[in-house]
Each structure stands twice: as C-alpha cells, then as structure tokens.
Amino acid sequence: MFVFGQSPPLAPLTPLGMNLIGIFLGVLYGRIFIEIVWPSLAGLLALTLVGGMKPVVLLNKSFGGPIAQMMFFIFVFCATINYYGLSKFISLWFIT
C-alpha cells in the first residue's frame, strides 16, 4: 500500500494520486488473497496516513451512512436471535 506511492508519479498523476492508487491495489490484493476485513481496515488507516481524507470525513463516509448503521444493528439482532434459539423455533413453526 505504501511502497507504490513512493515511486515517482507518472505525467498526469500527483504524488497523492500515486499513494491512492497504491492503497487501492493493496486493498484489492488483500481482499483477493487474504480476506475482506483486515485489508479494508488497513486501507482506511492508509487513507488517513497519506492525507487522502481527514479521519472524521473518512469515518462519516465509510460508517456514517444509514445503510451501514442499519446492517450493523441487523447483524447484532440476528446473532442474538440465533444465540437464544429463536430462529430455530420460528423456522420450525413455519415448516409445520
């Protein structure tokens, strides 16, 4: 993520543009070959470190949307229902 941005920029790109392309390629490589969560969080951290976005703006853009908040609470709600066995009860009720 950080090595690609240290190379000299090509003609139409600025040094920030080279850093952003390096972050994109690093996150893409990490998501393909490692997993989804850690490369994504590393990419968010890298965006703040290279100056691509301020931390408050980055958090508002990535986690501040209503869909991200809704999905977070839905996952917690579904995990709770599954933990207490209510999901099995509801599914068996629908089947019978």
Image (spheres, rainbow, N blue to C red):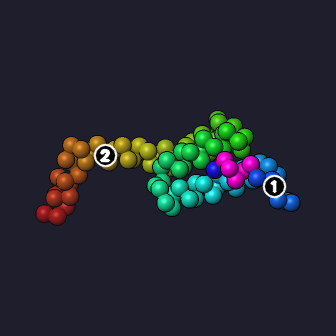
Give the magenta range. 2-6
Circle 1 sits in a helix, a strand or a loop, which is it? loop
Q: Are marks 1 and 2 in contact (CB under 8 Å)?
A: no
Q: Nearer the viewer, mark 1 or mark 2?
A: 1
Please identify the residue farthest to the left as the structure is shown: 96
Circle 2 sits in a helix, a strand or a loop, which is it? helix
Badge 1 local density, few (<14 within 10 Å), some, or many (20+)? some
Q: Is residue 10 visible?
A: yes
Q: Quadrant of residue 92?
A: bottom left
Q: Quadrant of residue 9?
A: bottom right
Q: Amino acid at mark 1?
A: Pro
| Mark linked to residue 62 | none
Badge 2 local density, few (<14 within 10 Å), some, or many (20+)? few
Quadrant location, the C terminus: bottom left
Can residue 21 be found in the magenta stretch? no
Q: Position of residue 42 (x, y in %)?
A: 56, 45
Q: How many marks?
A: 2
Disc 1 designates what residue? 9
Residue 11's place in the image compared with 19, above or below, is below
Disc 2 designates what residue? 79
Please identify the residue farthest to the top as the structure is shown: 56
- In three-dimensional space, the C-alpha distance between marks 1 and 2, rounded to whole angstroms, equals 47 Å
Magenta segment main secondary structure = helix
Q: Position of residue 43 (x, y in %)?
A: 59, 47
Q: Position of residue 72 (x, y in %)?
A: 44, 44
Please identify the residue farthest to the bottom as the structure is shown: 95
- In the image: residue 40, left or right of residue 74: right
N-term-proximal mark, 1 vs 2? 1
Residue at the (49%, 60%) spot, across then down: 33
- In the image: residue 30, left or right of residue 83: right
